[in-house]
Amino acid sequence: MRSAAIHVAVAKRLLEELDQQAEAAMDALGREQSAEFLAAIDARAGLLGQLDGVIGNLTVADGTASGDPRMQAMLDDVARAAGAALASHQRLVARARRERDRLRTVMERVDRPDAIANQYSATARPASKRTLSVTG
């Protein structure tokens, strides 16, 4: 049971860190800091790898303590922490999609000619050439 409690504590800590990294990634998106965003995403990938190992160990521990109410309470705690991490992940995905769509719209506008600018450039009078004669 002690081993399971350690795995639960580690899993909850990793899930909290995942939540924090999601917030860091969203902040970086808001400030258009691609390096910080990618660093947060890389950190999340590492945390998910660690979490996978911890959950695997917890599964083994759960098999030996099956039916124990204390074990069930610990697993419920992990499930709540996982729910919070999933919610922050979903917010991150939604924010990243909005940013992607915003950038796509900007790129489409850049590729489109500006009708008003073209109208003014076509109707503008060309500057007349002025010359100064020194001979008369």
Image (spheres, helix red, strand yellow):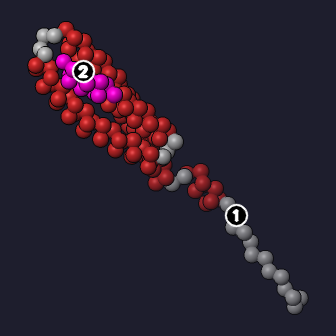
- Above-or-below relation of 107 to 94: below
The residue depicted at 16 percent of the width and 30 percent of the height is 56
Q: Is residue 11 magenta?
A: yes
State which quarter of the image contains the C terminus: bottom right
Image depth: mark 2 or mark 1 in front:
2
Nearest the eye: 106 or 92:
92
Q: Which residues are magenta?
A: 1-13
The residue depicted at 36 percent of the width and 28 percent of the height is 16
Q: Quadrant of residue 66?
A: top left
The residue depicted at 42 percent of the width and 38 percent of the height is 25
What is the three-letter code of the residue carrying label 1?
Arg
The residue depicted at 59 percent of the width and 51 percent of the height is 116
Position of 23 with respect to 79 (left or right) is right
SS class, disc 1: loop
**Could you tell me if the residues under marks 2 and 1 are in contact, i.e. CB atoms within 8 Å?**
no
Mark 2, residue position: 5
- Above-or-below relation of 16 to 35: above
The residues tagged by marks 2 and 1 sit, at their Cα atoms, a distance apart of: 81 Å
What is the three-letter code of the residue carrying label 2?
Ala
- Above-or-below relation of 121 to 84: below
Mark 1, residue position: 125
